[in-house]
Image: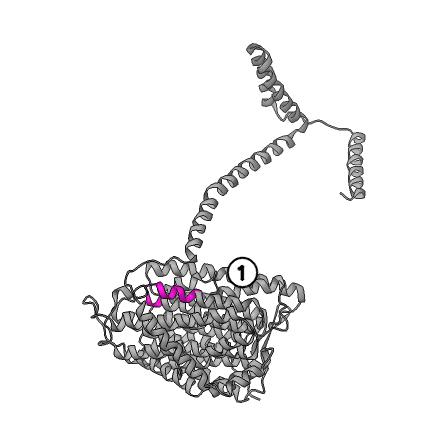
Amino acid sequence: MATWIHPGFIYLFGALLIPVLRGKIRQAYMLFLPLAALTDLIFTARGAFGALPIETWHIPFLGYELLLGHIDNLSLFFAFLFVIVSFCMFLYALHVKEEWQHVSAFLYIGSTLGVVFAGDLFTLLFFWEVMAWASLFLIWYRKTDAAWKAGFRYIMVHSVGGVCLFAGVVLQLRATGSIAWGFETLHQGTSASYLMLTAFFINGAVPPLHAWLSDAYPEATVTGTVFLNAFTTKSAIYVLLRGFTGYEPLMLLGGIMAVYGIIYALIVNDVRRVLSYHIISQGGYMVAGIGIGTGLAVGGAIAHALCYTMCKTLLFMAASAVLATTGTIKLSDLGGLYKYMPRTFWFYMIGAFSISGLPFFSVFVSKPLVIESAVLADQPLVWLLLEAASIGTFLCLAVKIPYLTWLEREKPTNIQAKDPPVNMLLGMGILSVLCIAVAVYPQTMYHMIAPAVEELASEPLTFEHYIAHPYALSRVIELTMFFLFAFPAFWLLREPFTHRDAKIALDLDWFYRVTGKWVIWFCEKPLMAFASLIDRNVLKLAAFFVWVSRNPANALRIKGAETRLKLQKLISTSERARSYESGLERVQIRFPGELPRFGLGASMLLVLLFLAAYVLLYLLGV
């Protein structure tokens, strides 16, 4: 049987040739690599390398066996998602001439696939860190002061996440003696699981550990933010599915995420920051589905990962196209772009309708699964939070941004606008077709998901019952009426949501920054002063012991004499004290003087005394 080729390594090793290739050859090569990885996955799904699950690429390491290729239905589904989306992304970024941006993107996606196929904790940890560092350069390559600072904060937060994951791996290894990775081996409620969960929460941008996302993604390069939106947070969803399906605290946490993200998305001014906050919001649906843990919920979470990733990538592409052609992405500076960027507008609207969950657009066949699962699981609060976030999504992405960016008022005279290059339009066009195709033919996606649901969920049959009729008339009418009533309400109350004031929306990162300044001040001032004081006194103490060791007997006499001199100065005349002081100075000058000599008998007696003291302390257990 043929040997399986790891698709992640197609990206990782393929990145090495990008700096040496030029022009059309490099562009063709960049499109060839995702297609090669996709072909590899198709052969894998068809059983060319054996029936699933497959475990391959075993590597011995420090007495353990690494498993780089754990292939099952869940990992294969996410790999298909990441590879297909990456092809559209590289097509979109084909015109970028900075080769190191492309290298960073290939390393980023390759390491993400490494996380997906990791079959042990060491492999997971390694690719987790590569993913963080590779993605960093997609921010720094924008080469602005804001990008440098945001990138630094980004990698600092992810370094904390890496430390948490490393500590969790160490504790898991100590407790079980195994580096196996998965739901069966990770015991929830242990210190190891909590540390790993913290690391996954950081990458998943779960509040209050989310601020890095809305801080860093808007500062990335024009195409870099398109790559960033899809992989870090979705890989976190993947590992949560792999290790924490059915973990009940995730239910409410997911609902809070959904509402928290959409509130900030409604009030910020930067379009890419709006979309970044919306990543947090949509991630909440998947986290909630994972926490509910039933077949319908888990199937909805997996389906939403696919549908949402495609339409959110499309939205970021449209927003980045606006930035590339106009030079700005702030709602306060935009308006009237429809005449100049009509194709971009319609691609954006397909993404907006999709992510809003309108019938015959992709998220319609994923998000309602999670919402309905909350009802069936008797979680009214979670249901209410998810429904509220759905309203906010429609109002923010399908109404507010199009209204302020493309439709309202004339284009400002200080900006130039036109549709982006053909490759960018093609990237958006393919994703637009996929967003509609998935909604029109959802059974293909559902059949891919069903085996993974059976492996993970507590009640897989609930998923099978739902997917038999995704376009039930009652569901279509319900959602259509839902959006029809939401739009007039928005229009009547649109003033607070359509303001063009470039205000700063304070998020939790403000507290981190203020706290960080105080921590830095404490470390630089009081703590360093205390450390310096300790250092000086330790040096003095060490010097004193060295001085005493030169002649302990004379040293004790001198210290005794110094003490008596201080008393003499207090109670005697000054002449007597000076006389006593001059005698002390003569003794100090002669120090250490002649060392005392002990006879053999006295020496043996001292040795026996020390030995007896040691034996006594040993017997007493001191």
Frontmost residue, 575 versus 207: 207
Quarter of image, res 53: bottom right
Q: Quadrant of the N terminus?
A: bottom right
Q: Is residue 536 left or right of residue 29?
A: right
Look at 57% across and 15% down and name the residue there: 569
Main SS, magenta residues: helix
In the displayed structure, 558 sits above or below 479; it is: above
For the residue carrying disc 1, how many other residues have a C-alpha within 10 Å: few (<14), some (14-19), or many (20+)?
A: some
Figure quadrant of the C terminus = top right
Q: Quadrant of residue 27?
A: bottom left
For image coordinates 59% across by 19% down, the residue present is 566
Residue position for label 1: 163
Taking the spot 33% from the left edge, 70% from the top edge, the residue there is 490
Q: Which residues are magenta?
A: 260-272
Instruction: Confirm whether residue 72 shows in the render.
Output: no
Q: Position of residue 359 (x, y in %)?
A: 40, 83
Residue 463 x %, y %: 54, 82
